[in-house]
Image (cartoon, rainbow, N blue to C red):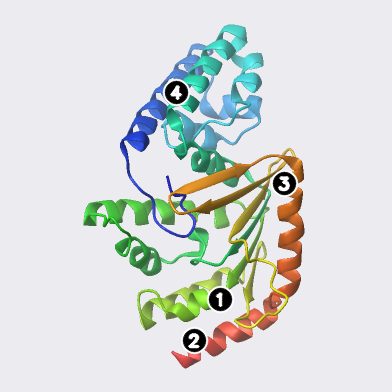
Amino acid sequence: MRADHGGGNSTSNTEAELSDSLKTFGAVLKALREESGLTQEEFAVRVRYSAAYIAKIEQGKRFPPGDLPVRSEGVLGPVGRKVLTAAAKSLARRAGLASWFRQWAGIEEEAISLYAYECRAVPGLLQPEGYARAVFERQLPPFTEEQIDEKVAARLERQALLVERPNTAFTFIIEQAILERGVGGASVTQAVIDHLLNVGGQTNVEIQLMPLHQEEHCGTDGQLYLAETPEHQWFGYTEGHRSSTLIADPGEVSVLHQRYGKLRSQALDCRATVNLLEQMRGAL
């Protein structure tokens, strides 16, 4: 499964099976929670996740975090933990590659710091509707109009994170070449630039452009994402054609941190980025 950050998602029997199994896990969690006489908000506080995140798990829209059964034991009891653990193991066996993005989506939703470097497309969290639609319309095999509408709506829904989590630090490094490519045409590119200028004005969002010419560029291995959880654990995330990888090993995450730090020093600073964006907009 291709993750929802730059390109489009692929649909397969595996993904359909995962969707059904996620709904089953969510139904089990909801039943156990209600049996304990707790609301979603009360349960969320006790397991130290947001109520919105728990709601989406129960709805089958998010992959459950690996430590949810352990955190739930003090609330649901040892039997509840065993039931959730068994359900999670079954889910992981059926999920395959698709589980990686769903795990990342949950981490992203709870993150207190989120770093992104993109060299393929505007990050999904920063895509205005016209750009997102243009991306999905160009996917192969092609999507139906109904599928495109669903995927665009899902992508725009994710962007609420930028507003709903004002205490989360979002940092984006985007290759200038992505905007120069002009996906969707001049009007779409103009809308992207306007959107970047607007979102970049938020106090919790920093956007930097990597200039076309940068001899010291260290991002040749491709895009990367980093996220810090409320428990101050860092995860990395990378993806390729129809594949994605969640990185939890501290040593590997450290490597991504080093690279991201260097990329930030090589990209234009926020003020210079605004100047370049305004210059590019004027040239359209």
Q: x and y percent of residue 242 in the render?
A: 43, 50
Q: CA distance from mark 3 to mark 1?
A: 33 Å
Q: x and y percent of residue 130 in the render?
A: 36, 69
Which mark is drawn over residue 119?
Answer: none
Which mark is drawn over residue 25?
Answer: 4
Q: Which residue type carries mark 1?
A: Leu
Q: Secondary structure at mark 2?
A: helix
Q: Which residue is mark 2?
A: 281
Q: Are marks 3 and 1 in contact (CB under 8 Å)?
A: no
In the image, 35 versus 126, the foreground residue is 126
Q: Quadrant of residue 13?
A: top left
Q: CA distance from mark 4 to mark 1?
A: 41 Å
Q: Which residue type carries mark 2?
A: Arg
Q: Which residue is mark 3?
A: 252
Q: Which residue is mark 1?
A: 197
Q: CA distance from mark 1 to mark 2?
A: 10 Å
Q: CA distance from mark 3 to mark 4?
A: 31 Å
Residue 81 vertical position relative to residue 248 in the rendered view, above or below: above
Q: Quadrant of residue 231?
A: top right
Q: Quadrant of the C terminus?
A: bottom left
Q: Is residue 193 visible?
A: no
In the image, 109 versus 251, the foreground residue is 251
Q: Residue at x 52, y 27 (%)?
A: 40
Q: CA distance from mark 2 to mark 3?
A: 38 Å
Q: x and y percent of residue 213 in the render?
A: 64, 83
Label 2 or label 3, whichever lies nearer to me, is 3
